[in-house]
Amino acid sequence: MVSIDLLGLLFLVALLAGFVDAIAGGGGLICIPALLWAGLGPVATLATNKAQAVFGSGTAALNFIHKGQIELRAAAFAALCTFGGATAGALLVRQLDSAFLGRLIPVFLIGFALYFLFSPRASDLDSRRRLGATPFALTVGLGLGFYDGFFGPGTGTFFAMGYVALQGYHLRRATAHSKLLNVASNLAALLVFLPSGQIAWPMALVMGAGQLLGAWLGSHLVLRHGTALVRPVLVVSSLLVSAKLLLDQLR
């Protein structure tokens, strides 16, 4: 049984994560540490994270589509490649030893905290396209899809940066398209994890409600004011929880 207090806390965590993820990506850096702190094992954490993340990325993507910010025809192949990559990544996670994942996750979290701390700020201006749509789908879509199925945090930001650097999109447009690819990867991973019984559904559904509200608010903020990278919360939360996980392993 999961306590009401814990579910309430996870709802607030997911609301913040959905809000941050819709604006800048990186919501997994908030949700994964929270689920580990709640007592889930590594595989159950990744599986539950995907179940609740579908609500957030789906809400943001639908809002961006409704506002005409996503070119569905142009992005369809990239979404398909992302779905395939995420399926492969999630299948690999299911085969790995959970103790190995427990040691790996803090390393990933610290690495991405440092990335968000020192990464350059992207521009809100369009630039020159450096890679065609098909090569982009086969490299960025497939590769980041695999990473998202395997682990996930920061994928939305990486997708957005890929669209900026390689497709010449300005940051608002890139953020919108990244949410569509996030939906594809989250859904693929969720379908792989479903038969495993590793998803903690009470947590996933409560957090999903928080994600839905947070993503709706965050995506509206992007549409009104452009995109600002929300770094401090990502950096502080991932570093603090990673330190706790590493200390637990040394005891």
Image (cartoon, grey):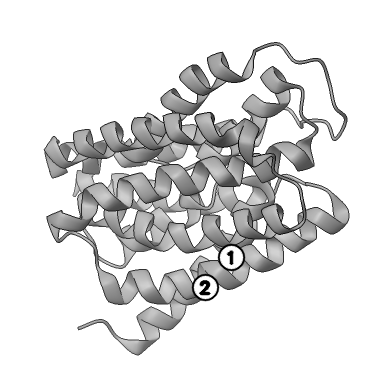
Q: Quadrant of the N terminus?
A: bottom left
Could one spot residue 101 in this view of the protein? yes
Q: Is residue 119 visible?
A: no
Asked whether disc 1 touches disc 2, contact meaning CB atoms under 8 Å apart, the reply is: yes
Local crowd at mark 1 within 10 Å, few (<14), some, or many (≥20)?
many
Does residue 245 appear to the left or right of 194 in the view shown? Answer: right
From the viewer's perspective, is 153 left or right of 23?
left
| Residue 40 percent location from the top left of the image | 23, 62
Query: Which quadrant of the view contains residue 85?
Result: top left
How many marks the image carries: the answer is: 2
Q: Could you say whether the residue bearing mark 2 is in a helix, strand or loop?
A: helix
In the rendered image, the vertical position of residue 26 relative to residue 121, given as above or below: below
Residue in the image at 64% along x and 31% along y: 74
Residue labelled with disc 2: 210
Hey, what amino acid is under mark 2?
Gly
Q: Position of residue 30 (x, y in %)?
A: 49, 56
Image quadrant assignment for residue 146: top left
**Residue lying furthest top:** 130
Q: Residue 51 at what x, y percent from top left?
A: 35, 60
In the image shown, does 245 or 99 lie closer to the viewer?
99
Cα–Cα span, label 1 and label 2: 8 Å
Q: Given the current orientation, which residue lies at the most extreme front position?
A: 73
Pointer 2: residues within 10 angstroms few (<14), some, or many (20+)? many
For the point 70% across and 22% down, which residue is it? 167
- Residue wearing tag 1: 16
Q: Is residue 125 above or below residue 51?
A: above
Which residue corresponds to the image point at 85% horizontal and 27% vertical from the top-left? 126
- Residue 70 against residue 199 in the figure, above or below: above
Q: Residue furthest bottom?
A: 4
